[in-house]
Amino acid sequence: MKNTPKNQFWLGLLPNYFKKVGLVISIAAIIAQISLVYISQNEPHSLKEIIKTICSSLFTVGLFFFAFSKEKVEDEMNYFIRMRSMALTLLFVIITGILSPILYLVFNEAPTIRETQGFATTVILQYMATFYIQKMMK
Amino acid sequence: MKNSLKVERAKLNITQQELADKINVSRQTINSIEADRYVPSTILAIKISNVFNTTVNSIFYLEAED
């Protein structure tokens, strides 16, 4: 296919082994966060907060690796489902972006770092859910 | 759009997995095409017709509402 652009289905996805890497990072982050409650009762509060923040960031990074890595067989139907999932996720982000200032106005609170982190995680989870549900339905 | 992929596959006596391997797609994609849940791209349609040594038109055809 001489005239077919080679990057027609290019989405900049990570290689398939990043699924395992992402899963390991996410699980390790969850375990670390749970064990933090039991282990570090004598640790200062600020150190605990730092570790907690790093753990949640790692969890989000792990999810990101899992969500944006190629499937074992990455074909055009996957590409199609991915594009639809991305479109739906974008819609979710826009709606949340429109609604959140109103909610913050009502409750008179600015978003914290943890809420921003939580939002990033929610967006990735939303994308993953849309992608895998659509894939199951195909 | 309808297709006679299942019939063509039965004629050659090949499984969905075997066809998928020949054209480098997943078995799920072949299953979705056969069930009319996914319309393949021109490139994939040509690849499929090449496997069955026939034309794209003889496997994929439009319906009245298309």
Image: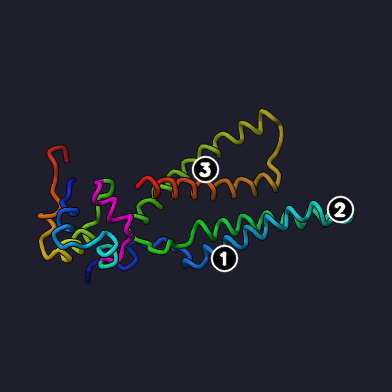
Name the residue carrying label 3.
A93
Indicate the quadrant containing the C terminus of chain B: top left, top right, bottom left or bottom right.
Answer: top left
Q: Are marks 1 and 2 in contact (CB under 8 Å)?
A: no
Under mark 1, the amino acid is Val
Q: Nearer the viewer, residue A124 or A33?
A: A33
**Mark 1 closeness class: few <14, some 14–19, many ≥20 residues within 10 Å:** some
Q: Residue at x 44, y 49 (%)?
A: A132
The Cα–Cα distance between marks 1 and 2, rounded to whole angstroms, is 30 Å
Q: Earlier in the sequence, mark 3 or mark 2?
A: 2
Q: Is residue B66 left or right of residue A100?
A: left
Q: Quadrant of residue A110?
A: top right
Name the residue carrying label 1.
A21
Q: Position of residue A9 (x, y in %)?
A: 35, 61
Secondary structure category for the residue under label 3: helix
Residue A37 covered by magenta stretch: no
The Cα–Cα distance between marks 3 and 2, rounded to whole angstroms, is 37 Å
Q: Position of residue A54 (x, y in %)?
A: 71, 58
Q: Earlier in the sequence, mark 1 or mark 3?
A: 1
Q: Report the chain holding disc 1.
A: A
> Which residues are the magenta region?
B23-36
Q: Nearer the viewer, residue A40 or B17?
A: B17
Residue B27 covered by magenta stretch: yes
Label 1 in the same subunit as label 3:
yes
